[in-house]
Amino acid sequence: MLKKLVAVVAIVPLTLTPISLANAAVKAGSTCPKAGNTATASSKTFTCIKSGKKLVWDKGVLIPKSATSPKTPELPPMPQDFQNLASNLEGIKYWAWKKVNLEIEKNNSVLGQVEIFTGPNTVPAQPNTLDQLTIGSKLFGTFNQIKKIYIIKFNYQDIEWAQSKYQPFQDQSWRSDYLTKAKNQCPDTRCRNAEIELNSKDEGIMMVGEIALSDQPKDKIENAGRYNGTREIHEYVHTIQMFNSSNSESRFNYNLLPRWMIEGQALWSAQAAVANSYDEYLELRNLDYPELRQMRPSYTAEWIEEFLNPNPVFIKDTDNWLYWQKYPNYRVYDIGGLANEILTSIKGPSAVMNLYVAVGKGSTFLDAFKQEFGINWNEAVPYISKAIAAELDRMSKS
């Protein structure tokens, strides 16, 4: 046993020595130890060859740089303040989406009990509603959420059935649309609207209009949001807004914030939440903004600034959203979505929801914004407006 060990030890220096010598002086024409050996130096591969009676390194072959090695994409800079938004459009989009997904990964779902009712003649466009609501719940998992939600899905044939389901859940019969809640989701035979509200027990009631099964293949191209779960998340986000902005004095404080913030956050959050990749997010984002691309010349930075309203006046128990009735209705969704994307890119989705919490505790929107973002709202609006206008320019050319 000892003899074998000695033999091995004796061999080791012999096998190591040529490698050490070879690496010590590898250049064209210098002596090498054994024909056929190769060595690398100065970005070349040299081969030991016989030249006359000598063994020398040949001229060497240049090692090509790999053309196929994947290059790590460089991430756009993360927006840090409002002043440089217009020069960092890619950073706004990427980091807003990224911060939403990081929040979903980090948080647990606090989704309450969910009961789903489907009309007898209805085939839902989104069969995985519970999964989608779980995503929405995790996005705002650090905020209070309702303990129970009823979801009523119905098509045009099932309007009366839906209304009969709705009324026992909603104990606030004083509501102006109490008797027409189901019909309101069906402006024509294609029920395409969705809506949510709370009852006096803070239970959610979601009405989801569905189109006929025969119309779904074509509709799936035109209205992807009806099939990917964004509608359900959109409406669920509204319950979080309402629940966190209410207090013992009033349950309707969310109208003390701009209407574009309410609808824009719900629309945009749903887009970002269901997208499994940044590319998918960009596709979903483009589906919701066709009018903005087509009508870009109308929406200048000045127009957007006036729309966002740098000096809003919100008064309790009044209709504070009358200001936005002079604008096309969908602008509170798409322009509002782009504004919420910007706010989220700077401080994350929780920062925007914190505004609702602050208002629920008695703060004004203006004070809450200054506290959360460190800048007065009327000072931030011009920067946000210029960034949105620049993004619309980019979208109209793509």
Image (spheres, grey):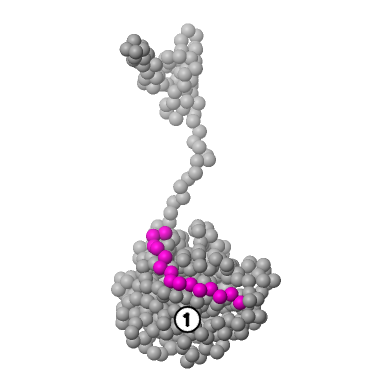
* Mark 1 closeness class: few <14, some 14–19, many ≥20 residues within 10 Å: some
Examine the image and state in which quarter residue 203 appears: bottom left
Percent across and percent down for residue 339 are: 44, 71
Q: Is residue 173 located in the magenta-colored stretch of the structure? A: no
Q: Where is the C terminus found, in terms of image quarters?
A: bottom right
Tell me what residue is drawn at x 52 percent, y 86 percent.
Answer: 167
Relative height, residue 344 to residue 1 (above, below): below
Residue sitting nearer the eye, 124 or 311: 124
Relative height, residue 172 to residue 268 (above, below): below
For label 1, the SS is: strand
Residue type at numbered disc 1: Glu
Residue 41 in view in this figure: yes
Q: Which residue is mark 1?
A: 197
Horizontal side, residue 395 vs residue 138: left or right: right
Examine the image and state in which quarter residue 186 appears: bottom right
Over which residues does the magenta segment extend?
A: 105-119
